[in-house]
Amino acid sequence: MRTRLNVYFPPALAKQVDELAIRRRISRSAIVEAAVASYLSPDGADRMEAAFARRLDRLSRQVQRLERNTGLTTEALSLFVRFWLSVTPPLPDEDQAAAQVKGRKRYEGFIETLGRRFASGKTLMDEIPEDVWPRSTSPESD
Protein backbone atom coordinates (compact mmCIF):
# COMPACT_ATOMS: atom_id res chain seq x y z
CA MET A 1 0.00 0.00 0.00
CA ARG A 2 1.16 3.49 -0.77
CA THR A 3 0.54 6.71 1.15
CA ARG A 4 -0.52 9.78 -0.75
CA LEU A 5 1.37 13.01 -0.04
CA ASN A 6 0.62 16.42 -1.43
CA VAL A 7 3.74 18.47 -2.01
CA TYR A 8 4.33 21.87 -3.53
CA PHE A 9 7.23 22.68 -5.85
CA PRO A 10 8.37 25.95 -7.34
CA PRO A 11 7.22 26.15 -10.97
CA ALA A 12 10.77 25.75 -12.35
CA LEU A 13 11.38 22.57 -10.34
CA ALA A 14 7.99 21.15 -11.29
CA LYS A 15 8.83 21.79 -14.94
CA GLN A 16 12.14 19.94 -14.56
CA VAL A 17 10.35 16.95 -13.00
CA ASP A 18 7.80 16.96 -15.85
CA GLU A 19 10.54 17.11 -18.51
CA LEU A 20 12.51 14.31 -16.89
CA ALA A 21 9.39 12.15 -16.64
CA ILE A 22 8.72 12.64 -20.35
CA ARG A 23 12.34 11.95 -21.31
CA ARG A 24 12.63 8.81 -19.20
CA ARG A 25 9.03 7.70 -19.80
CA ILE A 26 8.32 7.23 -16.12
CA SER A 27 5.84 8.82 -13.77
CA ARG A 28 6.50 12.00 -11.85
CA SER A 29 5.78 10.06 -8.66
CA ALA A 30 8.58 7.61 -9.49
CA ILE A 31 11.02 10.49 -9.98
CA VAL A 32 10.07 12.17 -6.70
CA GLU A 33 10.15 8.82 -4.87
CA ALA A 34 13.66 8.07 -6.18
CA ALA A 35 14.87 11.55 -5.27
CA VAL A 36 13.52 11.33 -1.72
CA ALA A 37 14.91 7.81 -1.27
CA SER A 38 18.30 8.98 -2.48
CA TYR A 39 18.19 11.98 -0.17
CA LEU A 40 17.31 9.84 2.84
CA SER A 41 19.74 7.03 1.99
CA PRO A 42 22.73 6.75 4.36
CA ASP A 43 24.71 5.27 1.46
CA GLY A 44 24.68 8.62 -0.32
CA ALA A 45 26.64 10.31 2.46
CA ASP A 46 29.03 7.33 2.67
CA ARG A 47 29.66 7.42 -1.07
CA MET A 48 30.31 11.15 -0.95
CA GLU A 49 32.67 10.75 2.00
CA ALA A 50 34.57 8.00 0.18
CA ALA A 51 34.85 10.16 -2.92
CA PHE A 52 36.21 13.04 -0.82
CA ALA A 53 38.67 10.69 0.89
CA ARG A 54 39.95 9.41 -2.48
CA ARG A 55 40.37 12.97 -3.74
CA LEU A 56 42.16 14.06 -0.57
CA ASP A 57 44.49 11.04 -0.83
CA ARG A 58 45.31 11.99 -4.43
CA LEU A 59 45.95 15.61 -3.43
CA SER A 60 48.17 14.46 -0.56
CA ARG A 61 50.29 12.37 -2.94
CA GLN A 62 50.59 15.30 -5.31
CA VAL A 63 51.70 17.62 -2.48
CA GLN A 64 54.25 15.03 -1.33
CA ARG A 65 55.66 14.87 -4.86
CA LEU A 66 55.82 18.67 -5.02
CA GLU A 67 57.63 18.80 -1.68
CA ARG A 68 60.10 16.15 -2.83
CA ASN A 69 60.72 17.88 -6.15
CA THR A 70 61.10 21.29 -4.50
CA GLY A 71 63.54 19.85 -1.99
CA LEU A 72 65.56 18.24 -4.75
CA THR A 73 65.59 21.47 -6.78
CA THR A 74 66.70 23.52 -3.79
CA GLU A 75 69.43 21.05 -2.92
CA ALA A 76 70.70 20.89 -6.51
CA LEU A 77 70.81 24.68 -6.74
CA SER A 78 72.58 25.06 -3.40
CA LEU A 79 75.19 22.42 -4.33
CA PHE A 80 75.82 24.16 -7.64
CA VAL A 81 76.19 27.60 -6.03
CA ARG A 82 78.50 26.22 -3.32
CA PHE A 83 80.66 24.47 -5.93
CA TRP A 84 80.70 27.49 -8.24
CA LEU A 85 81.68 29.87 -5.44
CA SER A 86 84.44 27.55 -4.23
CA VAL A 87 86.12 27.01 -7.63
CA THR A 88 85.62 30.39 -9.36
CA PRO A 89 88.40 32.84 -8.59
CA PRO A 90 87.60 36.57 -8.54
CA LEU A 91 88.46 38.43 -11.77
CA PRO A 92 90.73 41.44 -11.96
CA ASP A 93 88.88 44.73 -12.63
CA GLU A 94 90.23 45.02 -16.18
CA ASP A 95 88.68 41.62 -17.12
CA GLN A 96 85.21 42.36 -15.67
CA ALA A 97 83.65 43.89 -18.85
CA ALA A 98 84.74 41.00 -21.09
CA ALA A 99 83.56 38.48 -18.50
CA GLN A 100 80.13 40.14 -18.32
CA VAL A 101 79.74 39.98 -22.12
CA LYS A 102 80.78 36.32 -22.09
CA GLY A 103 78.47 35.68 -19.14
CA ARG A 104 75.46 37.15 -20.98
CA LYS A 105 76.15 34.93 -24.00
CA ARG A 106 76.51 31.85 -21.81
CA TYR A 107 73.31 32.75 -19.97
CA GLU A 108 71.42 33.07 -23.28
CA GLY A 109 72.74 29.62 -24.26
CA PHE A 110 71.63 28.26 -20.90
CA ILE A 111 68.11 29.67 -21.35
CA GLU A 112 67.85 28.20 -24.86
CA THR A 113 69.00 24.80 -23.61
CA LEU A 114 66.61 24.97 -20.68
CA GLY A 115 63.73 25.84 -23.05
CA ARG A 116 64.54 22.91 -25.35
CA ARG A 117 64.82 20.52 -22.43
CA PHE A 118 61.58 21.75 -20.92
CA ALA A 119 59.79 21.42 -24.27
CA SER A 120 61.10 17.86 -24.70
CA GLY A 121 59.63 16.80 -21.35
CA LYS A 122 62.96 15.70 -19.86
CA THR A 123 63.42 16.46 -16.19
CA LEU A 124 66.14 16.09 -13.62
CA MET A 125 63.86 13.66 -11.80
CA ASP A 126 64.01 11.34 -14.84
CA GLU A 127 67.82 11.21 -14.57
CA ILE A 128 67.94 10.23 -10.90
CA PRO A 129 67.85 6.43 -10.39
CA GLU A 130 64.93 5.08 -8.35
CA ASP A 131 67.24 3.54 -5.74
CA VAL A 132 68.86 6.93 -5.07
CA TRP A 133 65.69 9.03 -4.94
CA PRO A 134 62.54 6.86 -4.90
CA ARG A 135 59.37 8.33 -6.28
CA SER A 136 56.37 7.99 -4.00
CA THR A 137 53.91 7.52 -6.86
CA SER A 138 53.91 8.12 -10.53
CA PRO A 139 51.76 10.94 -11.97
CA GLU A 140 49.92 8.34 -14.08
CA SER A 141 48.47 6.74 -10.94
CA ASP A 142 46.61 9.92 -10.02
Image (cartoon, grey):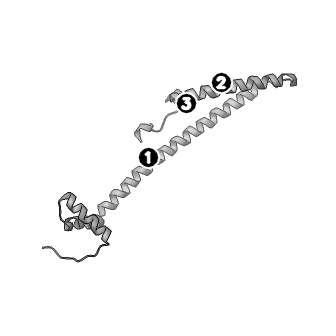
**Near-viewer residue (90 or 34):** 34
Does 135 sit above or below residue 49? above
Mark 2 is surrounded, within 10 Å at the Cα level, by few (under 14), some (14 to 19) or many (20 or more) other residues, namely few
Upstream in the sequence, badge 1 or badge 3? Answer: 1
Q: Is residue 38 toward the left or the right of residue 73 in the image?
A: left
Q: Residue at x 45, y 38 (%)?
A: 139
| Residue mark closest to the camera, 1 vs 2 | 2
Quick one: SS at disc 1? helix
Q: Residue at x 58, y 29 (%)?
A: 115
Residue 37 at what x, y percent from top left?
Answer: 25, 66
Q: Is residue 114 visible?
A: yes
Residue type, numbered disc 3: Phe
Q: Quadrant of the C terminus?
A: top left
Does 94 sit above or below residue 6? above
Name the residue beneath numbered marker 3: 118
Name the residue beneath numbered marker 1: 58
Mark 3 is surrounded, within 10 Å at the Cα level, by few (under 14), some (14 to 19) or many (20 or more) other residues, namely few
Upstream in the sequence, badge 3 or badge 2? Answer: 2
Name the residue beneath numbered marker 2: 109
Residue type, numbered disc 1: Arg
Quick one: SS at disc 3? helix
Upstream in the sequence, badge 1 or badge 2? Answer: 1
Residue type, numbered disc 2: Gly
State the separation of the CA atoms marked 3 and 2: 14 Å
